[in-house]
Amino acid sequence: MFFYFEFKTWLTMLKLVAKEPNQKRRRSLYQLLLLRVPSRAIFHSTCFILDYILFPKLWFVKVKEPVFIIGHARSGTTLAHRLMCGDERFSAFKYYELLLPSLLQKKAVHMVAWIDRTLLSRRLERRLAAWEKRKFGPTQHIHKMGLSIPEEDDLMYFNSCASGFWATKLPYMDALDFFHVDERPAAERERMMTFYRNVVRRQLYINGDNKIHLSKNPTYCGRVESLIEAFPDACFVLLYRDPHETIPSLLKLLHVSWKHQGNQSAERIEKSTREMVNLSFESYLHPLQVLERYPNTPYAIIDYRELTSAPKATIEKVYEHLGMNMSATYSQFLSAEEERTRKHETTHTYSLAEFGLDDTEIYDRLAPLFQRFNWEARIPENNEKELTNV
């Protein structure tokens, strides 16, 4: 019922900001953490309480059989999410709906949007479009974002100081852990997941309580067990793509964000990069390890190459594995999307060496997956012989 806030993480962030060498950046982060984040949290908390008073039907909304799309960042989770959002049975969050998690706030946005369209000739809409360009411009070529575009559920935790999105602002990956939720104490996991479920209930109230929540979150690779505990009837869709393509792409996204935030020491960037590499390996391995312990939890695996070459057939397989029927209308939607999706090929390639990585380490840590998905082992011949003989 109440807004979730991680005071311990918030205090840790304040201590880390105190170490920031750039005075202007340090002042900006203090303003964010000491003024904006607490004021937003208090505002959200008030709205959360009012939700149950103003919208009593919210008490009866249930989250049934949610579907969680997870996988290492840059593995095709966004594409799979977009394709499945074409099925009218699903409900998903847009970017602005995650920043305004209260039902009262969402209703207010709808009212303001109506006024802007009918009385203000969309002047507010144009201003927001200009703000989007400034806000998301530096990383749009890597990951497209916008206020009305579906986004990762994890963003709802930003003003709770519990979102992985904080990693783009504070490159202290060795001190701030937003990934290993499954390893947290049971009471802490339950509190975090209860908040998540309550925000999803509000979204279903808006979109229709007969719909199924559809979530896309690479960071949720570290909280699969927590999700199963909170949603026992959940289903999962796991995306897998060659780590030679995903890991350097994610690191490039983070480096661009860190550079945009201001000057950072080379040592700090190197430590955070190394930590993110380790988390990348866990993102590949942890979900399957958990799901093997829960044989009654339905899940489907998507190979990125199949998703981009035969999107309709791939989604049909997902539905089959999850025991879901596909409507004729949705089947037609997938057919129309076929050509567009086949063009979903990035023009950006990044070198492992740029981030202090080598092919041997990736193969060594993820060898079973290389064999399972028949990824190319790009390791020197002499190292390949050594690994074969181990």
Image: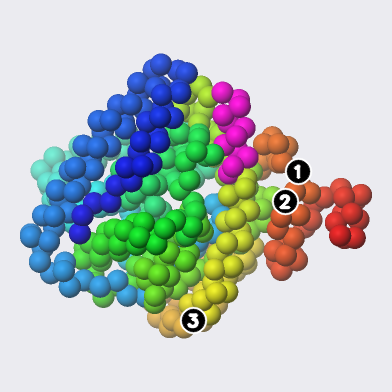
Q: In the image, what residue type sits under mark 2? A: Ile
Which numbered disc flags the more N-terminal residue, 2 or 3? 3
Q: Name the residue under label 2.
A: 362
Q: Where is residue 164 in the image (x, y as percent from the top left)?
A: 44, 46
Asked which quadrant contains residue 165, the reply is top left
C-alpha separation, residue under disc 1 versus residue under disc 3: 38 Å
Task: Tell me if 191 is positioned left or right of 381 in this view.
Answer: left
Q: What element carries label 3?
A: loop
Query: How many residues crowd around disc 1 within 10 Å: few (fewer than 14), some, or many (20 or more)?
Result: some
- Give the magenta range: 265-276
Q: Mark 1 points at which residue?
A: 358
Dot label at residue 296: 3
Q: Are the residues at dot 2 and dot 1 in contact (C-beta closer than 8 Å)?
A: yes
- Disc 2 packing (10 Å; few <14; some 14–19; many ≥20): many
Residue type at mark 3: give it: Asn
36 w.r.t. 146: above or below: above
Q: In this view, does 296 lie above or below 3?
A: below
In this view of the protein, which residue sits in the foreground, 218 or 140? 218
| Dot 3 alpha-carbon crowd within 10 angstroms: few under 14, some 14 to 19, many 20 or more | few
Q: Which residue is drawn at 54% across and 52% down?
A: 73
Q: Which residue occupies 10% across, 66% down? A: 56
Residue 114 on the magenta span: no
Spatial separation of the CA atoms under disc 2 and disc 3: 31 Å
Contact between labelled residues 3 and 2, with CB atoms less than 8 Å apart? no
| Image quadrant where one finds the N terminus | bottom left
